[in-house]
Amino acid sequence: MLPELKDLKTFRDLLADATGPDRAAAKAAEERNGQLTKPPGALGRLEELAIWYAGWRGDARPRIDAPQVIVFAGNHGVTAQGVSAFPPEVTEQMVLNFRRGGAAINQLAKAAGAKMDVHALDLDKPTADFTQGPAMGEDEFLAALRAGWQAVDPKADLLVVGEMGIGNTTPAAAIACALFGGAAADWTGRGTGVDDAGLANKTRVVAEGVAMHGGNGDGLEILRRLGGREIAAMAGAIAAARILRIPVILDGFICSAAAACLAHSAAGSLDHAIAGHQSAESAHGAVLARLGMQPLLALGLRLGEGSGAALAINILKSAVACHSGMATFAEAGVSDA
Ligand SMILES: O=C(O)c1ccc[n+]([C@@H]2O[C@H](COP(=O)([O-])O)[C@@H](O)[C@H]2O)c1
Ligand SMILES: Cc1cc2nc[nH]c2cc1C
């Protein structure tokens, strides 16, 4: 059961106190893996993926039958600074497109056998421009975390969180810079495709935001000050999934920035998450490296929407299918080494 998110302290406490995977199930899965009809280690990373998944599900021979993809959408006051190649109206237009089934993620979720939910968060009320003050007040931030928290289907057995929000690579870059240090230019990329002048302007905006808000508190406070509603909602959903023991596949740059805020606030809070795909957004590889994650795929996508993570669902499903469906040496009458 998922506890109610009364206030930010409750969220912080739940994040810090969440229990880890079921070690007995992981151990039993490891033993089973050693008996399957293949040379030891021959399924490469699929083997560790299946054991990791078994541990989080508390089942040495699990199945993946009910993946959930959630796309959160939000609008950003910082778009007033000309940081995106597209106008902010596109956020709402794309939400309609998601609801009609016309976006890439609709097809990718379908191809992965996942149900997809869309949550648009106060699109008519963009966050504040973080160069002027905190992006969200405490109540707004809590409401966004809660939207993510409540969006997770407790019956799901795998979760992908994605986003749509014109301008949101700017807050994601600012978050990464505030959490990991270095120069704004190290974390700022082209997003939907800004030109060189646009990139220079965006880098200045990120630097201003980090100068104003960086160094103020933990990852959650950084998320409130520099983030956005859809970014906070992704963080809320990832944290809820851990409590529900639902493994998570992370998507691109913005999703990873949301996740990084959780990891900064409480070590181990991403133990139930893996990286699905390394985005072409320039700093995504560096964020994943800081999180100690190796993406399953690198196909050059830079779309968001949960697209890269949705593509990785079938890899995890395949790992679990091999693990749970293969015969052991004894069952198949194949000679062991
Ligand atoms: O996920 C990524 O790595 C990613 C990289 C570049 C762009 N995006 C998507 O593009 C939008 C943000 O780009 P921008 O240029 O408006 O900041 C937002 O809707 C994201 O879903 C997403
Ligand atoms: C068309 C479009 C689709 C998107 N999907 C996620 N981010 C996006 C940004 C744009 C501009």
Image (tube, rainbow, N blue to C red):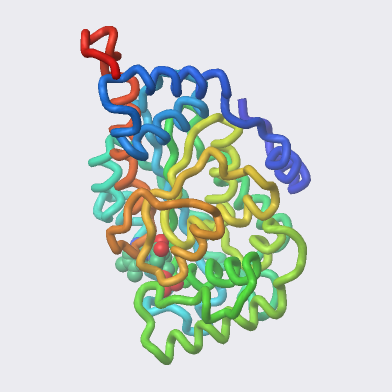
Residue closest to the eye, 268 or 243: 268
Q: Is residue 144 visible?
A: yes
Query: Which quadrant does the N terminus fall into?
Result: top right
Vertical comparison of 89 with 107: above or below? below
Image quadrant holding the C terminus, namely top left
Tell me if residue 1 comes above or below residue 95 in the rendering.
Answer: above
Farthest bottom residue?
A: 197
Q: Identify which residue is drawn at 56% across, 40% down.
A: 271
Please state the horizontal and vertical placement of residue 191, each as a whole percent of the image.
40, 73
Where residue 279 sits: x, y (%)?
37, 62
- For image coordinates 44% across by 29% down, the residue present is 51
The image shows residue 111, relative to residue 198, as above or below, that is: above
Quadrant in the picture for residue 37: top left
Q: How many marks?
A: 0
- Position of 303 with respect to 2 (left or right) is left
The x and y percentages for residue 188 are 49, 76
User: Where, by quadrant of the figure, is residue 11 drawn?
Assistant: top right
Of 233 and 51, nearer the camera is: 51
Residue 156 visible in the shown view: no
Q: Nearer the viewer, residue 300 or 29?
A: 29
Q: Is residue 39 left or right of residue 306?
A: left
Q: Position of residue 300 (x, y in %)?
A: 29, 63
Between 98 and 107, the one nearer to me in the picture: 107
Q: Quadrant of residue 141?
A: bottom right
| Ligand 2 quarter of the rendering | bottom left
Residue at figure coordinates x 73%, y 45% from the top left = 12
Residue in the image at 39% along x and 89% along y: 196
Is 108 placed left or right of 173 in the picture?
A: left
